[in-house]
Each structure stands twice: as C-alpha cells, then as structure tokens.
Amino acid sequence: MYDSQGAHIFHTRMYGFPTGVAAAGLALKGHHPEADRFCEWAYGKYMHDLFPAREVQDGSVHGSLAYGRKYTMWLTGHFIACWYSATGENLWQMIREEQGDWAWREALFLIYAEQPDGKMVRYGDNFFRGTERFSFRVISERAFAYDEPLGRGYVDYLLKKHAGITNDRQGMEIGSEYQVFLYWDPDRPGLDRNVLPTRTLFSPHGTGMAFWRSGWGPEDTFIFFKCGDYFDNHGHFDAGHVEVFRRAPLLIEAGSYEGGTESQHYIKFFHNSIAHNTIQIVDPADPEDAGSQRFYNNQNMNTIEDYRLDKKREMGNVVFYRDEGDLVCLAADFSAAYPEDRVRSVVRELAWIGERYLVVLDNIVLADSKYQPRILWHYAVKPRLGQRRFTVADGGARAVISVLAPVNAVLDTVKAFTVGTGVYPPEHPRPELGVGRAEVSAPVSADTLFTFVQVIDIADESIQPAEPLCRVTDAGHSVTVSLPTGELRLEGQPGSRSVIDFFKN
C-alpha cells in the first residue's frame, strides 16, 4: 500500500504505513515469523527517507496545520516512541544530535504558529485551525521525550484552556486520552511560552516560514511569512505570502478548503498564488490571465534522492535573515516560482521596525516588458481607500498600507475570488474568507525592472498613522525609507545587500 498509493515522502499518509507496520512488528516479535521483516521495512523507510524529509522541513509542515498535526507529526512521534520503548534505541536523541533537532522543533513550530486569537495560522489545505485538537498529542509526546519544561508548560496551557469547552471537559480530542496518562504530570509544572524569542525562522531552504510577533498576548501583533518549495498537493502555490494580525486578521490568505480539491473555487482560486498576499506576473493583454505562479505536480517523490534531484519543486528560499534589536529583516528569492518566460528575478524583502512598521520591498525583473507585476493584499473587512494608501481596520486595530514606489504605481481594488473575468467563491462565502483584494501595479511600459516599496503601519486604531517617505536610486540598489522613528537604508543587490540598517532619529 505504501508504494501503490503514490508514495511521496512529504505526504501525510506515507507516515501512517511504516508506523503501523513497526508497531505490529514490535508487538509480534518472537511470536510471528515475519515480525523482523516488518520492523526492518518500517525502520528503513523512516531512517532512509522520512526522517530526512522531516529534517528538510526543520520542524515545520507544508500542507497545513490540520494535516500536519493530525498525521505527519503525530505518526512520526509515535513511531519514535514505540521504537524506543521496545528496543531501547533512542531516536529522539539521535535526531537532536545529528539531524538539527527537528522533532523538538515540531513542538516549537506549533507554539509559534498559534495566532493571538488562539487559532493556528492558516495556509495550505487547512480543515481545522483550533488548538483543542491535534496540538496536545504532538507536543506532549515531545515534551516528555526531551523533558522540556517549555513543552510541559504549553501542554498545561492547552489543558486549562480547553478543559471547559471540549467533550467531557477532557481538554483534547477524543482518542488521545491515553497520552495524558503517558506524558502529562500535573506535579511537574513547566515554563510559559513567553520565555521564547518573539521572532523566529523555520526551514529557510525548505518551507521557508517566519513568525514575528510583538508578544504572546491576545492584543499583540502577529506576522507570518511563507516562501518555500512545493512539496505536495496539500500545499499551495504561495511563495512570498505575508499575513498580518493584530486584534483581528488584517491581511489574510483568502478562500477556503471547503468543497475539497475538485471544486472550481479550489482549482481556479484557493490553490493558486492569486489567493495569497504575493506577486502576480500578468499579461494585461489577456483578460483571462491571472499571472499566477507556475503549476507543478509530483506525487511520486518516493525517496529523499527523488526530492533532491527534482529541480521543478524548487519555488523559493529565504536567502537572508537578521534579527537585531528593533529591526528584524529577511529576503526571499522566489524567481523559480514563475514561468521562465515571464520573469528573470523576483526578490521580496521584509523589514519589521519597532514592532510597528513592516516595510515590504519587491524587486522584480521581467523577462519581457509586455508583462505587468501586481502585488496583492487580501482582507476580511472592506478597506478605507486614500491617496496611494488603504486602511484595513477591525477589532480596534488597523493596518495602513502606503504605496511609496514606484512613483507611477496604481492602487486598485478587486472583488473577492475574482480570477480573470470569472468569480469563484467557496461553498459558504463569509467575510473571514475574504471580501476582496487590493492590487498594486505599475503601467506597462518598456521597463522590465521594478522596485515596489510599501510600508504597512500596524497599530491600534487610536494611533495616528505615519506618513512614510522613500527614495529609490541606482535601479533599486539604494533604498531609503523614512519613518517617524528613523530611516531604513538598504544598499547593494536585493537579496545580498551590503547594507541593511535602521538609523533612529
């Protein structure tokens, strides 16, 4: 069955087969003539292919935090735990010492991926965003295996948070109760998650996910960035995607997994980059051309060697990352996400300053001047439009997006779920899935090189928005953004700048 169902080392179901076979082999050892073969097969699959796949993703998962928690992470942890208890071989420790500690980083990933409203960040084919299911069974096993106080503290938090709202007040999904008895000790309190750094990066050359937050409370700002490879069909074509949350979702992934992968909403919209806050490269002469990132499908990546040899799965990488004081910044190159006849280079740079101003620089070199770059911003509430800026406000907070460059940039708004001349809504449209999008573009000309500069001012509605300014020279190799608190300066080639500094007033 492992081979006949389209074996794919990043697909959720592939972790189920060797975990089940290993458990059977270990239980039947000494009682069944094929028990050793069962164990050898399962151990070989994990050691040769599935553990290396998890190492590539560095604790993250590509195909949503529903599939990822429920299957990939949980099944992997159960294999390691079963193997250790039956054989004494401590694969937990081996992973920590030799493979970048990805198993514990899975627990950290889930902690970071919880938004201030208690929901898991939404990406990929996500069918469930709550923490009352799936999170406990992943984190409790790893907290116990590594004796991690932080994990124990987060498990305590989950149980206290959900005990009053889940079935029989048990605090987690039915079927995982046994893990409470195995892994939870109420007499061993842990550490609160607020001891963690508020900003981090996972899998820069794999899934490429960054989490930036101002703190761990419900009123804090939360920024999510994603730029990585396309691993399998539960992922999306969403390289360069940015989400912003403060008190409420302000800039969002639009659309829904409702209706599954066969719906027109999924095929035309949700699965594609047009549903995300990224860049489209459009042929404006063709009214049906959406300019989405290139489509790719490979469900036969059977081994880690297959993955490494498959260059088409490469979509993007985080090529630079720095976190110092009031400035955290990154650069992501996702040129490979687009058809070669449309772009030569696409590099998005983000800089978050003073936990308020998110500067977004998009450096684009077209392969043909007939194409037009469009930067998309999806929202769940109707925006307030201004001169070269728009405001998304909800829950007492707002994001003010100011378009600073190029000087001839045009800001338009588009009806929700529009692709070309068609509209493809989900089964049950509602504001949280998107009420429209803004598109920032420049008129088609003989130019092939573009530098878009936008500043997203994220604060409570009571705070007066800033009036940022910028100066772009030397074909985007020199950029200065002026903010009320100081100047951000960037010099050199986008993606490998010689200078990235913030000079306070």
Image (cartoon, helix red, strand yellow):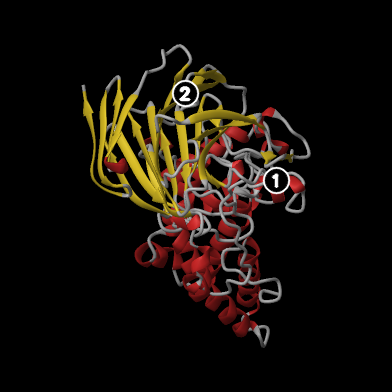
Give the x, y percent position of residue 232.
60, 61
* Closer to the camera in the image, 80 or 189: 80
In the image, what residue occupies the spot 77% across and 49% down? Answer: 263
Q: Amino acid at mark 1?
A: Tyr
Give the x, y percent position of residue 157.
52, 36
Establish if 133 lies above or below 306. above
State the quadrant of the C terminus: top left
Give the x, y percent position of residue 297.
62, 64
Q: Counting residues from the N terminus, which is met first, the one under dot 2 or under dot 1?
A: 1
In the image, what residue occupies the spot 35% across and 44% down? Answer: 330
Q: Residue furthest front?
A: 446
Q: Is residue 459 visible?
A: yes
Few, some or many C-alpha atoms within 10 Å of disc 2 (few <14, some 14-19, many ≥20)? Answer: some
Residue 481 image-quadrant placement: top left
Q: Which residue is mark 1?
A: 257
Does dot 2 land on a helix, a strand or a loop?
A: loop
Q: Residue furthest bottom?
A: 33
Residue 402 image-quadrant placement: top left
Q: Which mark is residue 388?
A: 2
Establish if 434 lies above or below 263. above
Does dot 1 land on a helix, a strand or a loop?
A: loop
